[in-house]
Structures are given as C-alpha cells and as structure tokens.
Amino acid sequence: MRVQSFGPTREEEVSKFINSISEHVGSEINLSERVFSLTYGITAKAVFGKKCKDEELFIALVKDASAAAAGFNISDLFPSATLLPLVTGFKAKLEKIRDRFQEIAGNIIEEHKIKKVASNVDVSNEDEDFVDVLMRFEECGLCGDDIFTGGSETSSTTAEWAMSEMLKHPKILKQTQTEIRKVVNKRGTIDETCIQEILFLKLVIKETLRLHPPAPLLLPRESRERCEINGYEIPAKSKVIVNAWAVNRNPKWWKDPEVFNPERFLDNSIDFKGLNFEYIPFGGGRRVCPGISFGLANVDLPLVKLLYHFDWKLPDGIASEDLDMSESFGVTVRRKTGLKLIPTAYHPLPA
C-alpha cells in the first residue's frame, strides 16, 4: 500500500520525463542521464514530499557519497592497517560527508516539524512522505542515503540495462513493444494497473536483473558463529560478501548463462524475492532488500511509457550487435558509457 500511495507522484514525474524526451524527437539523447535524473526525482518526492528547500543539496551529497564509496581505496586491501584511512585522507572525506548528511537531515526534519505544528493537524497516512513515517518511529537520521541508493541508483541502473539489452536484441525489443502497445491501446491509458498485464516486460526485467544485478556484490554480512560451508571453514565474526553477479551466471543453474533470454523465465517459478538462491539480485533471507517493490515500480512505468510512445534507434548508424555493453564499477554497476539513442514518435502524447 505504501508503494501504491506514491503512484500519483511517480506518474507525474514520469509524464514530465516523457514530455522532455518528446521535445528531442529525431535528435540524439543520453537516456542514461535522463533515467538517472528521473528516478532521483521520484525518490526525492517520496522522501521529502512535494517541496523541500534542501532537496537538491541532499541529492548532490548522495551522489558524492556514492562516488566516494565506489572509488578505489587502498585501505580495503589492508584492513589490518588501521592507520591507512588516516594517511590517505579517506576517513576524513567520509566523515565530512557524514557531517553534511547530519546537518541537512536535521534541517529537513526540523522543516517537517515546523510544517506539522503550523498546520495544527496530523498528516494522514496517504499524505505522508518517508520523513514523516520515520519521524513517527523516531528513526530518522542518515537513512536518506540508503533510501536514495536503494530507490534511485538500482532503479535507474536496471532501466538503463533493460533498454540496452533490448536495443542489443531488436527481436526482443519488438516483442516487448508489441505487447505493450496491444495492452495500452486496448485499455486506452497507461497507468500502474495496466502494467500487470504486460507479462513479457516482466520477463525482460527479470532477465535484466539476472545478467545485471544492480549491486553485484551484496552488502557485507558478519557470521555470528563458526561454521563450515562446502568444506570451507568460516570463523566467527568473518565479513562475508556474496557475489550475486556470479551466482546469477552460474552455468550449473542456468543454460547459456551469458545469453540474454527473457523466455527462460516462462513457466518458471523462480522469483527475485530471495527464496531461490540461484537468483538473488536483491539478496535473500531476513536481510533481503526491503525496497524491492518501490525500486521495481520506478522501473516498470518508465519502461512502459518509453516503449509505448517512442521507437528507438542507435545513433551514427551503429548496428545493434555493435552496441558497447561495457560495465562501470561503482555502488551499482552501470554502463561504462551513457546509453545514447535517437527517439522517434510512435504515439502522440496526450494534450
């Protein structure tokens, strides 16, 4: 219900996103940058509400934090050398970002408190943003960074790779667009309810998450007690990092694991909720990603509208098989180069 309550905000932001693309029909655009801005905009409205004076500052700080976390840090290679973070200046950099987070988060919380007192009424559940919810539970602090990374970075990365794979495989792109246009033309409108009928797109997203899990290395965990797994002894308090990227491409579980084939999920009960350990784009167990529904909602609607309203081609006569699919290392694994495409109008936008 909470994810659904942000539906109007999501639809408003996606409509503005599509309108901005329609202004550049026939011209080359960097779709990666536009999708990234879209998902950050949706998440910002969900976290802060419609208006927040510190929203842009907070988003910029999240980007700085993501860049810092993604960069090479020699102290990671020598964790026992406790002085290295001090010598390299990495610790000071992180502390500076943390202090700015605390300052801006404090301003945002205070702004919400003032608005609540001024209105002299309790905000209804439907009108609450994430800050309101967290204030009720007195848990608001640096959580905004987690929400932005989970709700924005992963969504934009997934949408970016889904479009890349479809452009790389024109038959799959055509099949997806045909289904979307059939469903939408029958219903006469695009909203989040019609997405449930677009089944092949669901398969495309599943396969995208298999080949391109947004976070290829899941968040580190610590073993509480000594155990043995497949002959390997894991001491208590060991830091354990699961390589979801490798798991999702294991030939033991997947036929032709390097091939993009959405139809492998037809008549297949494997899901990404963490119950099938051969497919864990969002982790699993008690620590599965809590923002799956919110993140995927920010992928579904933009893709449906992008594929309904526009046809797409690569610039400069680039053949689909020559599309560069190189990855860039970071908090999430995005494309090394932005996805540059030329949109052509298929269906006019509503006036």
Image (cartoon, rainbow, N blue to C red):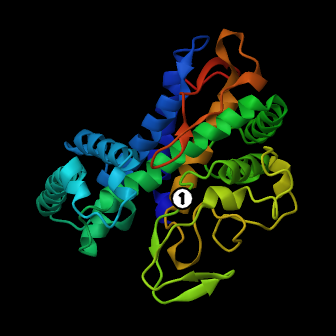
Q: Residue at x 25, y 66 (%)?
A: 140
Q: Residue at x 33, y 46 (%)?
A: 68
Q: Is residue 334 above or below residue 283?
A: above
Q: Residue 28: x and y, percent?
A: 57, 14
- Side of 16 relative to 279 (left or right): left
Instruction: Report helix, strand or loop for mark 1.
Output: loop
Q: Is residue 21 above or below residue 296?
A: above
Q: Residue at x 53, y 27 (%)?
A: 338
- Side of 20 relative to 207 (left or right): left
Q: Residue at x 23, y 41 (%)?
A: 57
Q: Amino acid at mark 1?
A: Leu
- Side of 194 relative to 36 (left or right): right
Residue closest to the eye, 201 or 154: 154
Q: Residue 287: x and y, percent?
A: 50, 74
Q: Quadrant of residue 186?
A: top right
Q: Quadrant of residue 25?
A: top right
Would you call the spot at circle 1 few (<14 residues within 10 Å), some (14-19), or many (20 or more)?
some
Q: Which residue is mark 1?
A: 217
Task: Report if residue 104 is visible in the image.
Answer: no
Give the tally of numbered discs. Answer: 1
Residue closest to the eye, 262 or 18: 262
Residue closest to the eye, 190 or 314: 314
